[in-house]
Image (cartoon, rainbow, N blue to C red):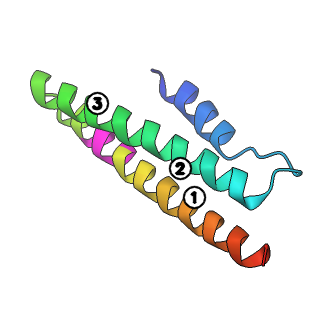
Amino acid sequence: MRDDDRDRRDRMDTDYDDEQDLGQRGTSDKMRGAMNKAGGKVEEGLGKLTGDRSTEAKGKMRQAKGDLQNTAGDVEHKTDDVLDR
């Protein structure tokens, strides 16, 4: 995937509908996080397999992004729970 395509997709990852509540956003972020983490593992493995350190590093970064998205989803869920009380 070209870098400009990835940048465009990353910008889309954070586009939310204003009417979407935090619980739904949390679920979306957790799903995106899981997808990025899985994709990053594949990318890292491909980099190791081919000896391409750049691809391996990009895979590790993508996994870290997935972890952050997952954490953001947890925070959004917990915040939504508190606000719904």
Residue 59, percent across and down? 30, 38
Cα distance between the residues tagged 1 and 3: 23 Å
On the image, numbered disc 2 is attached to which residue? 30
- Numbered-mark total: 3
Quadrant where the N terminus sits is top left
Q: Is residue 77 above or below residue 83?
A: above
Q: Residues within 10 Å of mark 3 (few under 14, many from 20)?
A: many
Q: Which mark is residue 56?
A: none
- The residue sitting at 11% across, 24% down in the picture is 49
Which residue type carries mark 2? Answer: Lys
- The residue sitting at 53% across, 49% down in the picture is 30
On the image, numbered disc 3 is attached to which residue? 43
- The residue sitting at 63% across, 64% down in the picture is 77
Q: Is residue 58 magenta?
A: yes
Q: Are marks 1 and 2 in contact (CB under 8 Å)?
A: yes
Q: Is residue 50 left or right of residue 58?
A: left
| Label 3: element kind | helix
Q: Earlier in the sequence, mark 2 or mark 3?
A: 2
Residue 83, percent across and down? 78, 76
Q: Earlier in the sequence, mark 1 or mark 2?
A: 2
On the image, numbered disc 1 is attached to which residue? 73
- Please report the bounds of the magenta region as a residue range: 57-62
| Label 2: element kind | helix
